[in-house]
Image: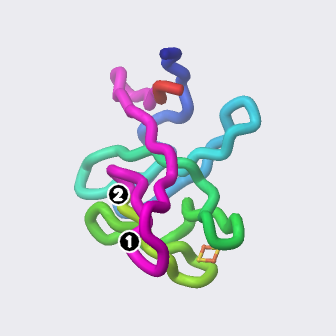
């Protein structure tokens, strides 16, 4: 368990995502309803980044072909059963965002 600073709070706006690269690992960070979520960035369909996807509550839509994932659990919500992206714990320390990776 290693906590790594990945961004400052002002780098991500409510209802948006941002992709960060941590030692070659691509992670999508989201802020939705005042809560931060971090999840593996690459869609299992064709490796599109889900970071720029549209967010509604805890659901993000991949911008490429519109697969949906729960950003809290990582679960794919349509098309295939049992597909799950890795999720990461997020901690806010003052104005900084840390990820447990
Ligand atoms: S790459 Fe995400 S739906 Fe196709």
Determine whether the beta carbon of the residue marked 1 sits less than 8 angstroms from the nearest atom of ligand 1. Answer: no
Tell me where residue 52 sits by quadrant: bottom right
**How far is mark 2 from mark 1, CA to CA?**
22 Å
Q: Badge 2: how crowded within 10 Å, few (<14), some, or many (20+)?
A: some
Q: Secondary structure at mark 1?
A: loop
Residue 85 is left or right of residue 21, and the answer is left
Determine whether the beta carbon of the residue marked 2 sits less than 8 angstroms from the nearest atom of ligand 1. Answer: no
Q: How is the image coloured?
A: rainbow
Ligand 1 placement by image quarter: bottom right
Label disc, if present, on residue 23 of the rendered structure: none
Kindly identify the residue that appears in the image at 35 percent across and 44 percent down.
36
Circle 2 sits on which residue? 14
Kindly identify the residue that appears in the image at 40 percent across and 59 percent down.
75
For the residue pair 1 and 49, the one nearer the viewer reads as: 1
Kindly identify the residue that appears in the image at 53 percent across and 24 percent down.
5
Looking at the rendered image, the disc whose residue lies closer to the viewer, 2 or 1, is 1
Furthest-right residue in view?
Answer: 24
- Residue 54 percent across, percent down from the top left: 44, 73
For the residue pair 18 and 89, the one nearer the viewer reads as: 89
Q: Which residues are magenta?
A: 71-98
Tell me where residue 70 sits by quadrant: bottom left
Residue 69 sits above or below residue 19 on the image: below
For the residue pair 96 and 75, the one nearer the viewer reads as: 75
Q: How many marks?
A: 2
Circle 1 sits on which residue? 77
Kindly identify the residue that appears in the image at 44 percent across and 36 percent down.
88
- The reply to whether the magenta stretch includes residue 48 is no
- Residue 41 percent across, percent down from the top left: 59, 54
Instruction: Please tell me whether the stretch drawn in magenta is mainly helix, strand or loop.
Output: loop
- Residue 7 percent across, percent down from the top left: 53, 35
- The reply to whether the magenta stretch includes residue 72 is yes
């Amino acid at each position: 368990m290693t906590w790594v600073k990945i961004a400052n709070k002002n780098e991500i706006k409510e209802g948006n995502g941002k992709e960060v690269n941590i030692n070659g690992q691509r992670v999508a960070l989201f802020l939705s309803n005042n809560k931060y979520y971090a999840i593996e960035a690459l869609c299992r369909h064709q490796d599109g980044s889900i970071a720029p996807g549209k967010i509604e509550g805890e659901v993000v839509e991949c911008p490429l072909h519109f697969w949906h994932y729960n950003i809290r659990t990582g679960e794919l919500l349509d098309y295939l059963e049992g597909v799950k992206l890795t999720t990461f714990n997020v901690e806010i320390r003052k104005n900084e965002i840390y990820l447990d990776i």
